[in-house]
Image (cartoon, grey):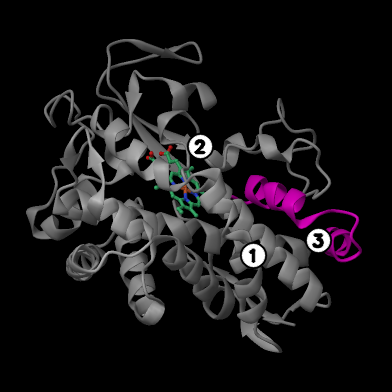
Amino acid sequence: MRACLRDRQLGRNFRHVGDESEFAAAEPLDPRRQAFWDTERWSLLWLEPPEHTRIRKLVAAAFTPRSVESLREPCRELARELLPEGRFDLLRDYAQPYSIAVICRLLGVPTDRARDLLDWSHAMVKMYELDTSEAQAERAAEAAGEFRDYVVALAEERRREPRDDLVTRLVEARVDGERLTDAQLVSTIIVLLNAGHEATVNTLGNGVLALLRHPVQWQRLVNGEVEPAAAVEELIRWDPPLQLFERWVLEDAVELAGQRVPRGAKLALLFGAANRDPRVFVDPDAFDVRRANAGEHIGFGGGIHVCIGASLARIELTTALEALVERAPGLSLAEEPRRNRAFVIWGLEALFVQA
Ligand code: HEM
């Protein structure tokens, strides 16, 4: 899996080297969903070098270890402040408002539209699933249009009145002497906002469920035997929030694990399976927060598309677990949870707990 992620003969996109006639598994982009494709056009997730390199460099400049580390204390405060008491849905009432507040703080986006941001994001990510319905695609395009208008207005505001935040830095940034176009700005801000909370929220949901289903493991956190930061790695390994990423084979006769794969083929990389690889993890199906090498999971990907927000995600998840352990040591399941019926973005519909 790691070799595939690093292999430059494979790409997230093929449109820089060929068209749909060669890449037969590609579905033509439905023009009725143009608003969605427009917001994806410059998303880091879909770009390949040299465009990817230019934009990634710019975004990476904002993710300096110092700027991310400076969010630890605000995360700690928010994690405690937003934690409800009694019976609540861990996803809707805690993980979502918390995670959106953190990413908004990083970007300098006001939280007054947090509910809209979440709704737009949830609608848009349905397009990454394997069985997107017409109604979902329509809603995704609508959401993308609304999200675009919001980001364009926000960028305009920061142009008029610059602030010390990431949106202003992106608005003012120059790459190779050129500014980002509006379309590039929109894609970049949207991918940061969406990627910045969807996976974190689902890690928290899947992870807390795993802990509550394995009370011995939860007790190890409560009694201080295991640090939340270490447990976070096992949460991501055991039940990762992102199960599948695709790659296109860009060159002829690529050899993968002893098999020849033709140019134009599409590969499905199954992260959940790689995280249970018995060659890497002893007794891989066991959930064990003391696992020494849990951090070797593939959850944040690898190669040029490796998650740019990984250190922020780790801080966010660690501080949320710290808050839960400290304020709700007796946490229990209040209801049997249901899966969200998505596959790529793997999570729960709701997780009702009792604090
Ligand atoms: C537990 C939480 C998270 C997980 C498991 C996760 C996982 C991933 C993975 C697997 C990829 C690579 C996809 C591929 O190779 O095709 C990725 C890319 C990315 N992630 Fe994350 N992520 C998380 C949190 C975040 C956060 C908090 C942010 C933003 C602040 C973020 C922003 C991004 C961006 C922008 C990319 C695209 C990078 C590129 O293509 O160059 N992620 N993430």
Left or right placement of residue 140 versus residue 64 in this view: left
Name the N-terminal-most of marks 1 and 2: 1
Q: Which of marks 3 and 1 is nearer the N terminus?
A: 1
Q: What stretch is highlighted in magenta?
A: 214-240
* Residue 79 at x, y percent in the picture: 63, 72
Where's residue 66, x and y in %? 56, 48
Q: Is mark 1 on a helix, strand or loop?
A: helix
Residue 15 versus residue 169: which sits nearer the camera? Answer: 169
Q: Report whether the residue tagged 2 is closer than 8 Å to ligand 1.
A: yes
Q: Mark 1 is on which residue type?
A: Glu
Q: How far apart are marks 1 and 2 (CA)?
A: 27 Å
Q: In this view, does 315 lie above or below 258?
A: below
Work out whether 84 lies above or below 73. Answer: below
Q: What residue do we see at 23% from left, 41% from top?
A: 174
Residue indicated by mark 2? 301
Across and down, in percent, residue 197 comes to: 47, 61
In the picture, measured across the screen, residue 127 lies left or right of residue 274, that is left
Q: Residue 73 carries which label?
A: 1
At a point 65% along the width and 45% down the height, the residue shown is 237
Q: Mark 3 points at which residue?
A: 214
Which of the 4 quarters of the picture holds residue 124?
bottom left
Q: How far apart are marks 3 and 1 (CA)?
A: 29 Å
Query: Residue drawn at (63%, 84%), measured in percent from left and top?
Result: 88
Are discs 3 and 1 less than 8 Å apart at CB? no
For label 2, the crowd category at 10 Å Cα-Cα, with few meaning under 14, some 14 to 19 and many 20 or more, is: some
Q: What element carries label 2?
A: loop
Residue 82 — which label? none
Observer-nearest of 79 and 197: 79
Q: What residue type is labelled 3?
A: His
